[in-house]
Amino acid sequence: MKINRFVAVGAGLLLLQVILVASVRYSRSSLTLLKDEPWKVAGNPHGKVYLVEFSDFVCPHCYDLQPVLKRLITEFPQLYVIFKHYPVMGDRSEIGAEAAECAGDQGKFWEYSDLLYENRGKWYSQVDKDPHRNIGPPLLQLAEEAGLETETFKNCLKSRAKTSVVRGNAEEGKQWLVEGTPTVLLNGRKIMRKKDYDALRHEIEMALAKSQ
Amino acid sequence: MGAAVVLRILLGSVFTYAGFYKLIRPAEYFQMVVDMYQVAPDGLVPMIAAVMPWVEFVFGFYLLVGYASRASARVVASLCGLFLAILVQAYVRKLPIDQCGCFGGSFHLTLPQSILFDNVMLLVAMGLSMVKGHLPFSLDRTLAPALPVSVPTGP
């Protein structure tokens, strides 16, 4: 009788734990990583391999990664690429990311991002940490170059409407143990090795082979 | 004896939290952590990532509430030993791991910090597994007749 009571209590505790986990549990789907603004994705949304890039527009290695990703998207029709912000260089990095989001509102996210990467030395030091006060000419010049409607862009940036999106991406990154940029996740696995073309191509080929 | 109760509750809390936090996140989070340490074949990673958090959570909770305390302490000690081996091999191989991922993304510990922390937990768990009888504030004591408690004091 004593043993039965003991076992019953143990089983009861186990059941309680299962109920607790089930009631609190997040969706097990990795689609949480795939949800983001529509202008920050590229490639085939129904592809078997998805690559998530956590990036900062001030980071030189992130800049180096962009042509690699463009080439991979062209070569692998099953590849789906999602861009996530992970500003590591402080407030100015964050403002740059918000500027890219505002450009995304006008359908020019990738064009503006390319300009941010290419001109990071120019705009970073001249961006005011408080866009309510002064956005700074460089970001507006890049907006003109990208063909954006500058008043709309300026209002978007000044309002800090995109702060929550950028910080949401960064929080997501922390959950995935992102420490620096660029960080690449391929089908949910962090790529630990070099992120040059050959290494990523090899990883994608392996991922495709596994998905067959 | 008071110290043993406190240590049991603390150790149980750590494992309960660690297991629970991993269980409520998508499976891919912890699969990525397991993969980082490069000790398991790819095919086994999902299974390990699915089972390990449950073992941590269940036996951590049992230890916390003082149910089957000695057996739970032994399981927790085994886990600590296993984690320690994995952490040390990662450190020796100089794997590019900035934080251990032991608590998902909620708590950041570097590899050396994790090794130290694990050593401490292992010693505590081994000590608890040698306690004879039932400690106060435990389900074991409620469910079984009172027995004299013997806490190991050293060699």
Image (cartoon, helix red, strand yellow):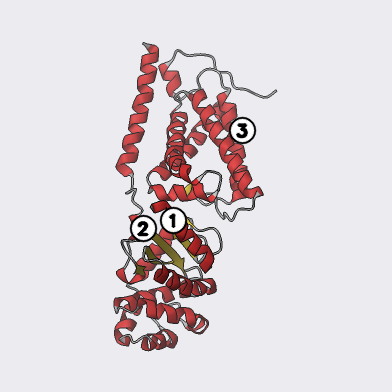
Left/right of residue A38 with respect to residue A52 in the rendered view? left
Residue corresponding to mark 2: A48
Amino acid at circle 1: Ala
Disc 3 from disc 2: Cα separation: 46 Å
In this view, B60 is above or below A4: below
Amino acid at circle 2: Lys
Chain of the residue under the numbered disc 1 shown in the image: A
Q: Quadrant of the N terminus of chain A?
A: top left
Task: Give SS at disc 3.
Answer: helix
- The percent coordinates of residue B32 (x first, y second) are 47, 51
Indicate which label's residue lies in the foreground, 1 or 3.
Answer: 1
Q: Are marks 1 and 3 on the same chain?
A: no
Badge 1 or badge 2: first in the primary sequence: 2
Chain of the residue under the numbered disc 3 shown in the image: B
Q: Which mark is residue B101?
A: none
Q: What residue is rendered at 50% in x and 80% in y?
A: A120
Task: Give SS at disc 1.
Answer: helix
Disc 1 from disc 2: Cα separation: 8 Å
Amino acid at circle 3: Leu
- The percent coordinates of residue B96 (x first, y second) are 59, 56
Residue corresponding to mark 1: A207
Chain of the residue under the numbered disc 2 shown in the image: A
Crowding at label 1, few (<14), some or many (≥20) Cα neighbours within 10 Å?
some
Q: Do labels 3 and 2 share a chain?
A: no
In this view, B5 is above or below A112: above
Crowding at label 2, few (<14), some or many (≥20) Cα neighbours within 10 Å?
some
Residue corresponding to mark 3: B123
